[in-house]
Image (spheres, rainbow, N blue to C red):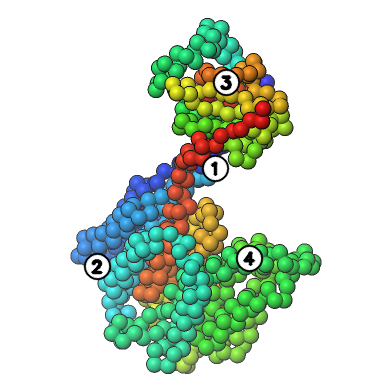
Amino acid sequence: MSSTTNSPTHHTSTIGAIGAPSRRNTELALLVFAVVIPVFAYANVGLAIDDKVPTGLLSYGFGLALLAGVAHLAVRKFAPYADPLLLPLATLLNGLGLVCIWRLDQSKLLQSLPAYFTAAPRQLLYTALGIALFVAVLVFLKDHRVLQRYTYISMFSALVLLILPLVPGLGANIYGAKIWINIPGLGSLQPGEFAKIVLAIFFAGYLMVKRDALALASRRFMGLYLPRGRDLGPILVVWAISILILVFETDLGTSLLFFGMFVIMLYVATERTSWIVFGLLMSAVGAVGVASIEPHVKSRVQSWLDPMHEYVLSRQGRAGHSEQAMQALWAFGSGGTMGTGWGQGHSDLIRFAANSDFILATFGEELGLAGVMAILLIYGLIVERGVRTALAARDPFGKLLAVGLSGAFALQVFVVAGGVMGLIPLTGMTMPFVAYGGSSVLANWALIGILIRISDTARRPAPTPAGNPDAEMTQVVRPS
Amino acid sequence: MSELTLTVMRLGFLAVLWLFVIVAVQVIRSDLFGTRVTQRGSRREAARPQQASRQQARQQSTPPQQRAQQGGGRRGRNAPSKLVVTEGTLTGTTVALQGQTITLGRAHDSTIVLDDDYASSRHARIYPDQGGQWIVEDLGSTNGTYLDRSRLTTPTPIPLGAPIRIGKTAIELRK
């Protein structure tokens, strides 16, 4: 025996949940950090472009700090045990996005374009609305399990949201993809961003009920569990819907996002690898099939396979070709490892959509590989916290919902970043929090709000068991 | 703005960005939560002889009965606040003492459900008397309840730290 000398008071072991501290002060400290970094970047852009600290520095900094402060106070009040990282990470991304959009606003080249408008103030307004929505989610959604009641209403409203852009008069075909709707007096809206959240609620509610049938009733074949034909129904329906989205709205990203989210949640609910195999096969078949028919998708695939060719064609003035994919690759290339520095790149050459779909190219050029890796890691940390929340959640609905939301978030980042970097064909989606776009910012703040609500419920320490009132009443009758 | 300043700012910004990521990861590290299990197995084995010798020493100086009465008289500071299972399959389970009767046995409605072959379904109970002194009473079990070494025949006050043995399970009152 080793001569371990324990103090005698340590001879019991205690098994129990750790009374997790609320970690709100950690969140506040990180939040201050997350506000300071964008302010630094903002000053840096001003110094690089105009040789002076931008005049709006104080108001911008105060604006961001105020929004972050409001969000933090709301979390402190309404979700005191929530995850300490989600809010600072999202705030940092949003702040960096604002700086990047403002930086592109300063570009002389973009200012000369007819479609130019100063996007940064609007994005700040959208951020404020997003934070308001975030606070509203925390205030009104006291318990995420309430959402479970609206399983089939969610399905219906998600379908409506997805179909809305196709309604004549309401939908707007902007640059080839029909994913916007025009609301008179308010501007345009991308319902797909919100459908992502609503659909996650439906999938979570549906799979929670059906997962046993999907997981257990299956035959084993070559190491894979083959589901019964009738259990294939739901995945076929979702597949068909996402194909329809792809055909009618010509939006590869949204369709990939929905199908991928469903497969992820199906896998998490049933623990059957076969669903992933089926999902990958079906999405491959669907994508290849549609890409060979639909011209808009086809052109996207072509510019993915040979961006240089597209660039040359576009320079020759041929219609229907885009030089953006190649420009984005050049932006990443000229950034190198450490980047050119804020305000010193030429990513504005991408021109159109430089501050929305292609905003990652600006980060790639001005912050370099080091900066893009940090940003992707921040996205990764948000997803990690979402999955950790799912692991910690006690109810199956909350687990599935957290997995679905973080899975959708991860897929969106993958689809956009992969598209801009030339890994997969380019899609018309926005980088969450960073890219310019009201719908995206609003929807993603709502998503973070729901994740914070679930994590608050998951991390809340269990109430101390009350003394059993029956115990004293119980009389033990001894047979004598 | 000079080239040097901009270069310093560029690298400084990247450093700050990465610092944020590292701090965030550190927060995750310190934030691992879940079930905490402390001190099982070998450490308990090592601690047990000490515990036994300490109890012997204590019992030699004052008889248990007398000590118990002292404890009952000075309620508050010396009153036990919890019941701790120190041996057996339930090792580590604690039950807060809040004036309620605690039943021990294999029956499912017991406060502490013993998973022990030598325990009866309703084996014993532990309850406070009028003076707040905790009493253990054997409920006609097959194999008996032992307070320290002696088999119980009547309801007996429990001194602090004395093991109540039921089969392979030992239970103590703690402050």
Q: Which residue is mark 4?
A: A211
Q: Which mark is residue A149?
A: none
**Dot 1, crowdedness within 10 Å: few (<14), some or many (≥20)?**
few
Q: Which residue is farthest left?
A: A55
Q: Which residue is mark 1?
A: B35
Q: Which residue is farthest front?
A: A480
Mark 3 in CB contact with mark 2 (< 8 angstroms): no
**How far is disc 4 from disc 1 in space, using C-alphas?**
27 Å
Q: Is disc 3 on the same chain as disc 4?
A: no
- Mark nearest the camera among 4 and 3 is 3
Give the side of residue B45 with respect to residue A431, left or right: right
Under mark 3, the amino acid is: Pro
**How far is disc 1 from disc 2 in space, using C-alphas?**
55 Å
Q: Is disc 4 on the same chain as disc 2?
A: yes
The earlier-in-sequence mark between 1 and 3 is: 1
Q: Is residue B121 above or below residue A118?
A: above
**What element does badge 3 sit on?**
loop
Q: Which residue is mark 3?
A: B155
